[in-house]
Image: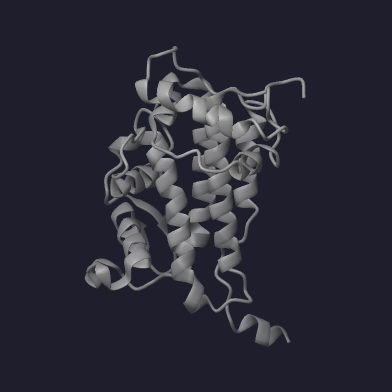
């Protein structure tokens, strides 16, 4: 490949103490992956890793929403998996260096989905309606509460969660795809966004997400973010009427 796979902006050496400690681990994690070895730096490897994890989560949502599955049984888990992808985006955007702060990360992720602009996303209020369908409008606070209910059930106050809406993931999908595309494009141009990625506390645990975050997508600073967004848009998160297969048969 003649052009760089994906040239993430680089922080000045030693400018981010957390990254100074972590970058060797990211370099070592990538070493066995000959498909990207020698063509990327540790921070780009981290960006591929995050992209791969989010790709895995989005594909898992797709599997859970397969029409062969009972919607009432798999939709809550599917939403919880999607929210984990949103939370990961929020952690990277915030540059969260701690092991906690999941609610803030989740909220930041939804703020970015609502308005993927670096200078203004954090100003989006909790009551901002991200999507509205034939059932309900869905604010950021609604979506955060819904994730907590999907993950913990009765461990949260059920009154915070409106009646479950089986249309919400299909409505969120194109917005999340656009948000991912915008974030990955930003890492090529924004020193601040790239520095926050370097700060974000994400463990370099296994190599597979690096491959799945780099190999399936078109190389290049413009085509890589766009192809990631297109891959997410190409999935089917729409509600499948369980009666449709019976009618069709």
Residue 79 seen: yes
Q: Is residue 78 above or below residue 225?
A: below
Q: Is residue 91 above or below residue 63?
A: above
Q: Tell me which residue sits at (69%, 39%) in the image.
A: 217
Q: Position of residue 111 (x, y in %)?
A: 36, 43
Residue 186 seen: no
**Viewer-closest of 154 and 243:** 154
Tell me the quarter of the picture where residue 207 sits. top right
Tell me the quarter of the picture where residue 79 sits. bottom left
Q: Is residue 151 above or below residue 70?
A: above
Q: Tell me which residue sits at (36%, 60%) in the image.
A: 147
Q: Tell me which residue sits at (49%, 34%) in the image.
A: 183
Tell me the quarter of the picture where residue 68 sits. bottom right
Image side of residue 66 versus residue 54, left or right:
right
Q: Tell me which residue sits at (36%, 59%) in the image.
A: 138
Q: Position of residue 226 (x, y in %)?
A: 63, 37
Image side of residue 69 versus residue 139, left or right:
right
State the quadrant of the N terminus: top right
Q: Position of residue 194 (x, y in %)?
A: 45, 25
**Viewer-closest of 117 and 92:** 92
Q: Position of residue 200 (x, y in %)?
A: 39, 34
């Amino acid at each position: 490949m003649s052009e760089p796979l994906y040239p993430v902006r680089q922080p000045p050496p030693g400018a981010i103490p957390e990254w100074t400690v972590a970058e060797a681990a990211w370099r070592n994690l990538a070493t066995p992956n000959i498909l990207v070895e020698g063509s990327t730096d540790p921070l780009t490897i981290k960006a591929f890793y995050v992209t791969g994890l989010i790709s895995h989560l989005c594909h898992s949502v797709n599997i859970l929403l397969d029409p062969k599955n009972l919607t009432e049984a798999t939709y809550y888990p599917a939403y919880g998996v999607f929210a984990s992808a949103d939370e990961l985006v929020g952690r990277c955007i915030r540059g969260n260096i701690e092991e906690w702060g999941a609610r803030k990360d989740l909220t930041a992720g939804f703020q970015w989905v609502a308005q993927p602009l670096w200078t203004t996303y954090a100003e989006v209020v909790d009551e901002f309606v991200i999507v509205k369908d034939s059932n309900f409008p869905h604010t950021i606070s609604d979506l955060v509460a819904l994730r907590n209910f999907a993950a913990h059930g009765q461990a949260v106050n059920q009154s915070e969660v409106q009646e479950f809406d089986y249309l919400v993931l299909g409505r969120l999908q194109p917005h999340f795809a656009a948000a991912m595309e915008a974030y990955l494009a930003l890492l090529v141009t924004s020193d601040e966004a790239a520095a926050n990625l370097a700060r974000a506390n994400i463990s370099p645990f296994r190599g597979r997400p690096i491959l799945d975050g780099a190999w399936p997508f078109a190389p290049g600073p413009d085509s890589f973010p766009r192809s990631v967004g297109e891959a997410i848009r190409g999935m089917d998160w729409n509600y499948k009427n369980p009666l449709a297969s019976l009618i069709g048969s």
